[in-house]
Image (cartoon, rainbow, N blue to C red):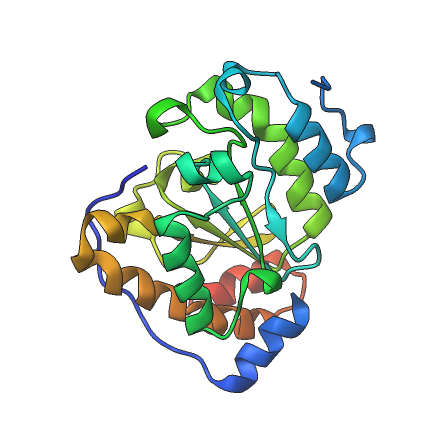
Amino acid sequence: MTSSDYEPGPCGADDSVKSTISKNIGERPASADSMESLEQVAHLIRKCIDCPLSGGRTNAVPGEGNPKAAVMLIGEGPGFQEDRQGRPFVGPAGRFLDELLASIGLSRNDVYITNVVKCRPPDNRDPLPEEVDSCKPYLDTQIDLISPKLIVTLGRHSMSWFFPGYAISKVHGKPRLWNGITMCPMYHPAAALHNPNLRSVIQNDFKELPNILARLEDINDDPEEQTKQLSMF
């Protein structure tokens, strides 16, 4: 869950943009018919035994936040504190994430936060492909139900779920399209805890989010127009 090869990134946002962001924002198998709300998804995740991670968890961690959020943040998987509390990003990396959100005028109540895998991998190891595959229906459904304007991936494993084969050091902070949704890959907040010199990189990338959202407000649903506009960042 650590990252390396950080590069500097950009910039800031005014109060009007921040206001716009805030305004917008067991049981198996998991079938689409049984996941018609975020509450139903969370219930199934807490009961799920689809992969071996379920056997070592204290709590599954479905996610939390605004069900109509304009911004969705997706990390890799729960850590020690998350497993104990059943909530995403509540350890040291979570405190840094709270600071990052506050820096652009947001809080946890304005966004939706979840992970690619919903149970803690042993010793915080990287999730295995089969574990990611087991959780895929849950994350797919969460994205569909929330329908965010912007998804921020936190860390290389989260990014790879959407963009396999890319290097986080090359694409962090740069928006791109995935299935008609604007994505912005970023380093995991935990990376700043392992290398304090990288803290400003993550902060600068995060401060660009209001500008990306403001640009999206002026873009219609035409993927070609979105690609054209996003290429200007």
Q: Quadrant of residue 221?
A: bottom right
Which of these two is toward me, 7 or 95?
95
Q: Quadrant of residue 128?
A: top left
User: Left of 50 or right of it: where is 191?
Assistant: left
Q: Position of residue 79 (x, y in %)?
A: 41, 36
Residue 57 drawn above or below residue 169: above
Residue 118 drawn above or below residue 102: above
Residue 110 drawn above or below residue 82: below
Residue 111 drawn above or below residue 137: below
User: Left of 129 or right of it: where is 225?
Assistant: right
Q: Residue at x 21, y 47 (%)?
A: 194
Q: Position of residue 35 (x, y in %)?
A: 77, 34
Q: Position of residue 90 (x, y in %)?
A: 45, 48
The quadrant of the image that shows the N terminus is top left
User: Left of 180 or right of it: where is 171?
Assistant: left
Which of these two is toward me, 215 or 14?
14
Q: Position of residue 106 (x, y in %)?
A: 53, 70
User: Left of 176 or right of it: where is 196?
Assistant: left
